[in-house]
Image (spheres, helix red, strand yellow):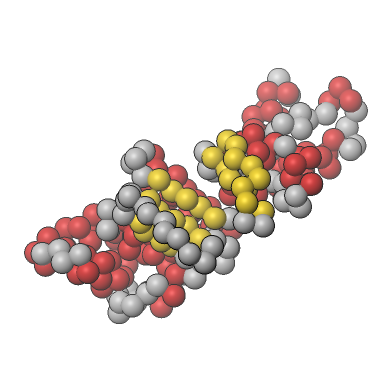
Amino acid sequence: PSSGTIKVAARLGAVFQNPEDQFIGATVEDELAFGLENQQIKPELMPNKIKETLQEIGMSDYAKSSPDQLSGGQKQRVAIGSALILNADVLFFDEATSMLDPLARESIINLIGKLHKQNPNLTIINITHDPDEILWGQRAVVLEKGKIIADEPAKVLMSDIDFLHHHQLGETFVSKLVSKINQKRPLNRKIPSSIISQKELLSWLLNSNK
């Protein structure tokens, strides 16, 4: 769109692909304080707010550290903290885990899940191309050429293999693994194709061997 207005009746916090694009503070503490200063929060109220946010994102031991010295996952935690400290109603993640290694990515996804569990009123919008990451969400919206072509519960969408293939979308790792395993298993021992997550596969394997 080249014209028009979008109104968001909430406080919006954004976390981007590269957290370094957001950093302006010399320390993690300064980074979190910047948003509070913009909101003209009284200086005497800032230390407790910063301390609480550091605990929330698991970065209490890095308050005096320079953001440049942190790992990729830690930098994203600080970026998330910068949004949280503003009491955001909506957290918007734009490919926020795409530059992270698998362990750091899982750490951030777990943190996102923890934040939503602690505050069910917090809306989290996560833009991602990672099929396994989509499964962590409740609702999945698929965009193609600027239009919504699917809006389903994440589990339902990622179980629709025909739809994923038709629109050149990736399957979860477990979905592809199950497909490969089933090619070599007899009909009576095939793994249900509805199993698309590690948790589901592990549960099925444990129960099927009883």
Residue 96 visible here: no
Q: Is residue 51 left or right of residue 4?
A: left
Using the rendered view, name the quadrant where residue 5 is placed: bottom left
Q: Nearer the viewer, residue 180 or 88?
A: 88
Q: Residue at x 67, y 54 (%)?
A: 144
Residue 23: quarter of image: bottom left
| In the foreground, 122 or 182 | 122
Image: 89 above or below 175:
below
Q: Position of residue 173 (x, y in %)?
A: 71, 47
x then y, percent, for residue 52: 24, 54
Indicate the quadrant containing the N terminus: top left, top right, bottom left or bottom right: bottom right
Using residue 31 as the reference point, say whether residue 165 is left or right of it.
right
Q: Which of these two is toward me, 125 or 79?
A: 125
In the image, residue 135 above or below residue 156: below
Q: Residue furthest top?
A: 210
Is residue 38 among what the camera can see?
A: yes
Residue pictured at 79% horizontal, 40% vertical: 162
* Location of residue 87 in the rendering, given as x and y in whole percent from the top left corner: 27, 53
Please state if 28 lies on the left or on the right of 190 as rendered.
left
Residue shown at the point (54%, 43%) measured from the top left: 136
Quadrant occupied by the C terminus: top right
Where 171 sits versus 46, above or below? above
* Residue for point 56% across, 67% down: 99
Residue 82 coordinates in the image, percent (x, y): 32, 63
Residue furthest to the front in view is 3
